[in-house]
Amino acid sequence: MQRLLKMVVRVIVWGLLFASVAVCEGISIYLYFMHDDLNFGYIGTVDATNSITKYIPIEIFLQLALMPFLLLQGSYLLFAFFLPLSIYNLTVLVKKKYKIHALFRKDYKQFSHVVKSLTFKSTFYGVAMILFFMRLILCLISYSASESFDLGSYLYWVI
């Protein structure tokens, strides 16, 4: 019974971590598409900058909230994987680089670092979603595996 309870807690935590990374990925992709729409003239510059100013702090706080949970779960490799992005996000938050305002498209072009960071974050969160999903599946498999755990059985079920 205690083993089942541990497994349920782990599955819930990894599920929440996966969901928060999925939200961060969605925000990054949404803002990247918004930038693309701005380049094609579908939306105005003010709308795009307002959305960036509104949604980037949400993404940053979600990503920074992941870090303590990764440490509590004992996932030190994933913690190390997220650490550079956390440091970058913390500097963006402290220096308030996410607050941009541009009235014209030529003013918006000076914020090219936003587009580069959105491209990187979309890729990063996509890889993180795959890793978290694999970890969630491994939690479920570990319960069905026997008490004597070996890495070969994990790799057999993952691959």
Image: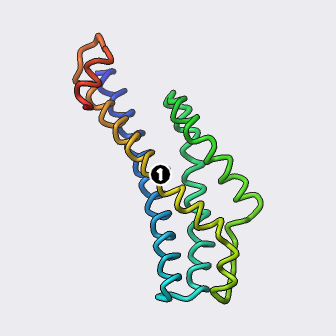
Q: Where is residue 96 in the image (x, y as percent from the top left)?
A: 74, 65
Quarter of image, res 91: bottom right
Farthest residue in the top direction? 148
Amino acid, disc 1: Tyr
The residue positioned 53% from the left and 75% from the top of the image is: 35
The number of callouts visible is 1
Q: At 42% from the left edge and 54% from the top edge, which residue is drawn? A: 22
Quadrant holding the N terminus: top left
The quarter of the picture where the C terminus appears is top left
Rendering coords of residue 142 (x, y %): 29, 24
Q: Residue at 56% across / 35% down in the picture?
A: 79
Give the residue number, with chain letter if any, for mark 1.
Answer: 125
Find residue 44 and report its image quarter: bottom right
Q: Quadrant of residue 29?
A: bottom left
- 45, 106: nearer the viewer: 106
Locate residue 88, reporting x and y percent.
Answer: 67, 51
Q: In this view, does 41 lie above or below 96?
A: below
Above or below residue 149? Residue 20 is: below
Tell me the element at label 1.
helix
Judged from this view, the residue extending furthest toward the right is 95
Q: In this rendered view, identify the residue nearer to me: 19 or 36.
A: 36
Taking 151 as reference, is 90 left or right?
Answer: right
Look at the image and name its color scheme: rainbow
For residue 99, side relative to residue 73 (left or right): right
Q: Position of residue 127 (x, y in %)?
A: 43, 46
Compared to residue 43, the image places residue 135 above or below, namely: above
Between 53 and 105, the one nearer to me in the picture: 105
Determine crowd level at label 1: few under 14, some 14-19, many 20+ residues with C-alpha closer than 10 A: many
Left or right of residue 15, residue 141 in this image:
left
Q: Residue at x 23, y 24 (%)?
A: 156
**From what the image shows, is residue 43 above or below residue 110?**
below
